[in-house]
Image (cartoon, grey):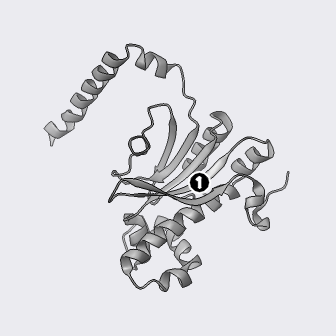
Amino acid sequence: MEKTYHKLLENNKAWATLKLNNDPDYFETLAKGQTPEYLWIGCSDSRVPANEITGTRPGEIFVHRNIANMVVHSDMNMLSVLSYAVEVLKVKHVIVCGHYGCGGVIAAMGNKQYGLIDNWLRHIKDVYRFHHVELDAIEDETERERRFVEVNVIEQVHDLGKTSIVQNAWKRNQPLHIHGWVYDIHDGIINDLGVTFTCTKDLHKVYQLKDM
């Protein structure tokens, strides 16, 4: 185990050396600041690295990850990341990216008790309840899981639009697009679900916030 741990540090030195060999100013340039155009809200799953699967370099994509890529209105961690990305970094795109075969989504479909994480899974279960008619009608379990992953992402896109952070950006005429994607671990391809919000009018009127 100790050898495996130190391997990470060795890999880091090799990576840094490679970067400097290709560009002697690589780290000096990075140290000057970041101006990413994208905020990625994804799953914590170790098989879904945002930079690698999108072919982006350090500094190009701001990242927040949690179990099942959730946008929970009381999650101060997520809200803080969103606020900084939208209000300070001025990102132009916020991408919610789920993935097929998501363990959190699959766990939320069942009734097994897991402990502390049950409190988080409840938010995912709420999504199932909203869409239970469609989901329960899918007989094939794998296909039902895949569709649940998709509708979960779509709901998180809606939840992003409901935030005052996003709506105030739109009121400032700040160019901001919210997208829903799903990554397929089996072939490495991202599925754009075709759900994109660009203004408050994309939301149901009950969620459209007025000025204080």
- Camera-side residue of 110 and 173: 173
Q: Position of residue 147 (x, y in %)?
A: 47, 72
Q: Is residue 103 visible?
A: yes
Q: Is residue 212 above or below residue 34?
A: below
Q: Considering only vertical position in the picture, is 76 above or below 4? A: below
Q: State whether residue 162 is above or below residue 8.
A: below
Residue 76 image point, x, y percent? 58, 50
Which residue is labeled 1 in the image? 179
Q: Would residue 116 be seen by someone viewing this image from the given angle?
A: no
Query: From the viewer's perspective, is residue 111 above or below residue 74?
Result: below
Q: Quadrant of the N terminus?
A: top left
- Mark 1, secondary structure of its residue: strand
For the point 54% across and 28% down, which residue is it? 34
Question: Three-letter amino acid code at disc 1?
Answer: His
Q: Left or right of 102: which side holds 129?
A: right
> Which residue is located at x 48 percent, y 18 percent?
29
Residue 124 horizontal/vertical position (percent) = 50, 69
